[in-house]
Image (cartoon, rainbow, N blue to C red):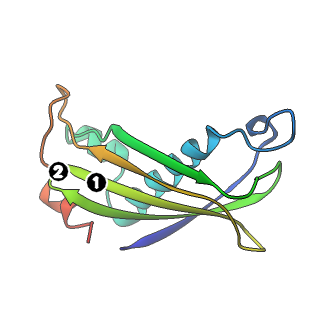
Amino acid sequence: MTLRRTRVRVRYAETDRMGVVYYANYFVWFEVGRTDWLRQTGWTYREMERDGVSLPVIEAQCEYRQPARYDDEIEIVTGGTLVTPVRVRFDYALSRAGDDTAIAGGHTVHAAVDADGRPCRLPDRVREMFP
């Protein structure tokens, strides 16, 4: 699996009253990792949509291990796997940069759909990006 790394810094707006990152923000960071993975591997969401393919999330899972807090720098390690010619899975590992504390991990599964929302095969060039 090809792994790509992305960093984000926790913004104040991403935390709750206790100063801990609100749980839904991890899924936003998964998206940041996924879009960067696609871009670094050679296919951006913009190109994908221009080519008439979208990747809606059909499954999402996150396991929270340690809290992230305001101003922490978070490293997102993302890997992608072709599940079928019409489905892909992305795996994520989030850690605090500097001390490598595991913050969270999870995955998302995406179905390829055409402009009408019908399942479609991923283009050959995209399937080749995944092991």
Looking at the image, is 12 positioned above or below residue 38? Answer: above
- Classed neighbour count for the residue bearing mark 1: other residues with Cα under 10 Å, few (<14), some (14–19), many (≥20): many
Among all residues in the image, which is located at the extreme top? Answer: 116
Residue 68, how many percent across, how many down?
76, 53
- Mark 2 is surrounded, within 10 Å at the Cα level, by few (under 14), some (14 to 19) or many (20 or more) other residues, namely many
**Residue 69: x percent and y percent?**
81, 50
Instruction: State the image coordinates of residue 75 (x, y, percent, origin top left).
Output: 64, 64
Residue for point 38% across, 73% down: 2
Q: Which tag is nearer the camera, tag 1 or tag 2?
A: 1
Q: Are marks 1 and 2 in contact (CB under 8 Å)?
A: yes
Residue 15 falls in which quadrant of the image?
top right
Residue at 15% in and 37% down: 119
Secondary element type, mark 2: loop
Vertical position of residue 101 compared to residue 112: above or below: below
In this view of the protein, which residue sits in the foreground, 22 or 76? 22
Q: Quadrant of the C terminus?
A: bottom left
Q: Considering the numbered disc 1 on the image, is that residue within a helix, a strand or a loop?
A: strand
Residue 77 located left or right of residue 52:
right
User: What is the three-letter code of the residue carrying label 1?
Assistant: Val
Q: Position of residue 105 (x, y in %)?
A: 56, 59
Which residue was labeled with disc 2? Answer: 122
Count of numbered circles on the image: 2
**Residue that badge 1 annotates:** 88
Query: Marks 1 and 2, how far apart in space?
Result: 9 Å
